[in-house]
Image: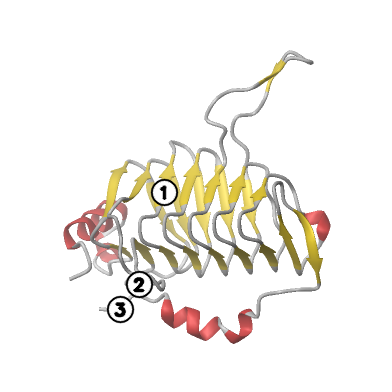
Amino acid sequence: MSIDWFQTLLINFKAFTLKNALLLPVIVYRGFKIVQFKGSIQLNVTPKFGLIGFGQSYEIFQRKKGIGEATINGILRINGKVQFGLDTKVFINNDAVLELGHINSFASRTEIICFKNIIIHDWVQFGTDCLIVDTNFHGLKDLSINSCLDMNKKIEIGAYNYIGARTTIKGNTQTPENCLIATNSLCNKNYLILGENILIGGIPSKLIKEHIVRDWESENEALEKYLTIKL
């Protein structure tokens, strides 16, 4: 009863061949709305039921406002299980590419705005109220050199990253594998030089601690089961 079957059937039969659409790789839950779909969903994994869940309730708190929405006018590229939580929002502009890895989850009220290219590798989780945006929306000009600045800049989040609640990820951000980002942080540059197994945070983010990781091995099996959609 929690699944919006009309939207689920509509998006699958628009996005995939008949054979793949019948497997229902995309599940849309009640309270979530596919506002517009003029782009494409590319599956780089074997199609199966519930690979992508829009508006999926997988967190501690269950109530929602019913304001979750997705506009997919570019490419949504999927490399595994991806779950968008309650009241999340996704916008992929024309010609933009949002590429998501296996076990990517976006907690309540997180917003993804993709105007160019956002790549998120395997095993990445975002806490509540995060913002991932690769555009400034408005053009900026550097008067010292009389030159317009790039409005849209690529984002790439490494594998085994955990991003704390209320964190903002801006264009130009690149993170290494096994990176933790503290709550209430702002990321806006290349952090690869800091190496792996790090905790960063702050506004803007900087190195806080080295030689620290989330214990993914102890959670892998549980996360696989927890984020899997079943009838």
User: What residue do we see at 42% from left, 79% from top?
Assistant: 226
What residue is pinned by disc 1? 90
Q: Which one is in front, 79 or 28? A: 28
User: What residue do we see at 51% from left, 85% from top?
Assistant: 221
User: What residue do we see at 67% from left, 25% from top?
Assistant: 149
Provide residue 83's location: percent of width, then percent of height: 42, 65
Q: Which one is in front, 76 or 190? A: 190
Provide residue 44's location: percent of width, then percent of height: 48, 62
Front tag of 3 and 1: 1
What residue is pinned by disc 3? 230
User: What residue do we see at 37% from left, 70% from top?
Assistant: 61
Name the element at disc 3.
loop
- Report crowding for label 3: few under 14, some 14 to 19, many 20 or more residues within 10 A (C-alpha): few
Q: Amino acid at mark 2?
A: Lys
Provide residue 187's location: percent of width, then percent of height: 67, 49
> Which tag, 3 or 1, sits closer to the chain's start?
1
What residue is pinned by disc 2? 48
Name the element at disc 2.
loop
Front tag of 2 and 3: 3
- In the depicted structure, whether residue 16 falls above or below residue 188: below
Q: Which one is in front, 44 or 225? A: 225
Name the element at disc 1.
strand
Q: Amino acid at mark 3?
A: Lys
